[in-house]
Image (cartoon, grey):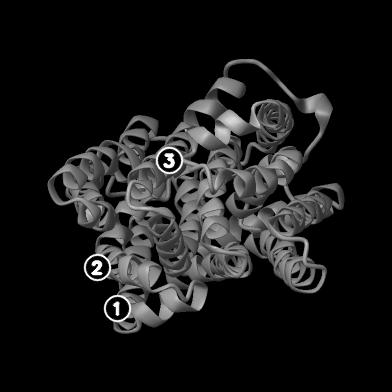
Amino acid sequence: MSNKVNDEQQYELLTQTPIPKLVLKLGIPTTISMLVTTIYNMADTYFVSKIGTSASGAVGIVFGLMAIIQAVGFLFGHGSGSIISRKLGARDTEVATKVASTGFFVCILCGIFISVSGLVFITPLMRLFGSTDTILPYAEEYARYIFLACPFMCASFVLNNILRYEGKAAFAMIGLVTGGLLNIFGDWFLLEKVKMGIGGAGIATGVSQFISFCILLSMFLRGKTISKINIKKVSFKKEYLLNIIMTGFPSLVRQGLASVSTMVLNGYAGNYGDAAIAAMTIVNRICFLIFAVGLGIGQGFQPVSAFNYGAKKYKRVKNAYFFTLFAGEVMLGIMAVVGMMISGSLIQIFRDDPEVIEVGTVALRAQLIALFFQPLCVCSNMLFQSIGKNASATFLATLRSGLAFIPAIIIMTRLWGLSGVEYAQTVADIITFMFSLPFTVVFFKKLPKTDSEDIP
């Protein structure tokens, strides 16, 4: 009886709470999680940078590996979460549990495969990700521990996204923030006190990710969720596994291309030395910290759009989209302006190297300008994926780090050298905006103007 009451309360929360209050209620815990996650990534960069410029570059190399792990986790996490939210909106808890269980256990198997393959082929993989001869030893040592933790990292993304899509963002925050804070402490202790070098950063990340996984899993085992994790509920029927993969495919494309673009970026930046790779690594970390605010609010929007679309409450879907877009523009705009004013100082915090500061300052200011174009792109992509418009979501997901970025950096670097590396992401963001806008306009023109209960 209590489960039925909780299910009904969750349904009322997501379909009746005023949109601004609901998006913020779900978005603020996610934003905190994103910020802490980004800060602990920056903590790796900060502590490792004290070892040297080549070690700093290794963090950027392994960032490409982390993007692949995230891609797999988001494939099953967003795929499962989106379907679960829509099924719960339609009050179908049995299918939600089958989807949650299938996504979770299949993702663990994929994580094990990546872990074993990565450890066997670690040297050629680090070369593929852009390691120079001087960066390679650091990258291998760091990546080894990331590969060991890979199954838990992948599965954590699934658990986190299911919790978010159920409207339990606060529970997801507990797991992610705890892991993030432990990682920061581990970086400080192992690098500053124990003097373990870059391997200490890898150990800190691996251990903290395992602890975060345990906390997130405990939410399901203790009955805090509507959908359940049960190996007996795993189904390889196409309506479950294939649907999860197709729904999560935009996330796989987006994150996978982020990894590819990191390799391409490192490859082109490497032509200008380790300092250029280190500078671009630092810039990407700073920008993602700022971007995490907008992304966190956007992830609060995802369960609102998916759940209400499943419940046929189309007015709430539209209202949630435009509120999230407005909030993202305001917050990212303010931080972009502040960031442009102190760009050089921000780079210097991570690496007090004149060459790194010079390259990083130019690139950072360029990417901060691009932040004004990103909220619409992110909101539109999240909207289409949340409601099952997989083709549109996949195409838009390919733009920022793929179809727009890769040609931009190739062409611009040939024309303008290092300046092409510094400005390529900004050009890619503007192109992505130009494609996302018409997709969004057409969607809202076709969206039903009345909800199901409004039809006599």
**Amino acid type of the residue that numbered disc 3 sits on in the rendered structure:** Met
Earlier in the chain: of badge 3 and badge 2, it is 3
From the viewer's perspective, is 22 left or right of 371?
right
Q: In the image shown, does 86 or 440 lie closer to the viewer?
A: 440
Q: Mark 1 points at which residue?
A: 340
Q: Name the residue under label 3.
A: 263
Distance CA(mark 3)–CA(mark 1): 26 Å
**Crowding at label 1, few (<14), some or many (≥20) Cα neighbours within 10 Å?**
some
Q: In the image shown, does 452 or 100 lie closer to the viewer?
A: 100
**Amino acid type of the residue that numbered disc 2 sits on in the rendered structure:** Ile
Res. 411 mark: none
Which residue sits at x=35%, y=58%?
A: 321
Q: Name the residue under label 2.
A: 369
Residue extending furthest toward the top: 237
* Percent x, y of residue 27: 52, 66
In this rendering, the count of numbered labels is 3
Q: Are marks 3 and 2 in contact (CB under 8 Å)?
A: no
Earlier in the chain: of badge 1 and badge 2, it is 1
User: Disc 3 vs disc 1: which is toward the camera?
Assistant: 3
From the viewer's perspective, is 54 left or right of 148?
left
Establish if 41 lies above or below 394.
below
**Crowding at label 2, few (<14), some or many (≥20) Cα neighbours within 10 Å?**
some
Residue 371: quarter of image: bottom left
Q: In the image shown, does 176 or 151 lie closer to the viewer?
A: 151
* Percent x, y of residue 127: 52, 35
- Per the image, label 3 sits on a secondary structure element best described as helix
- Per the image, label 1 sits on a secondary structure element best described as helix
* Percent x, y of residue 362: 27, 68
Establish if 47 lies above or below 278.
below
- Per the image, label 2 sits on a secondary structure element best described as helix
Earlier in the chain: of badge 3 and badge 1, it is 3
From the viewer's perspective, is 169 left or right of 378?
right
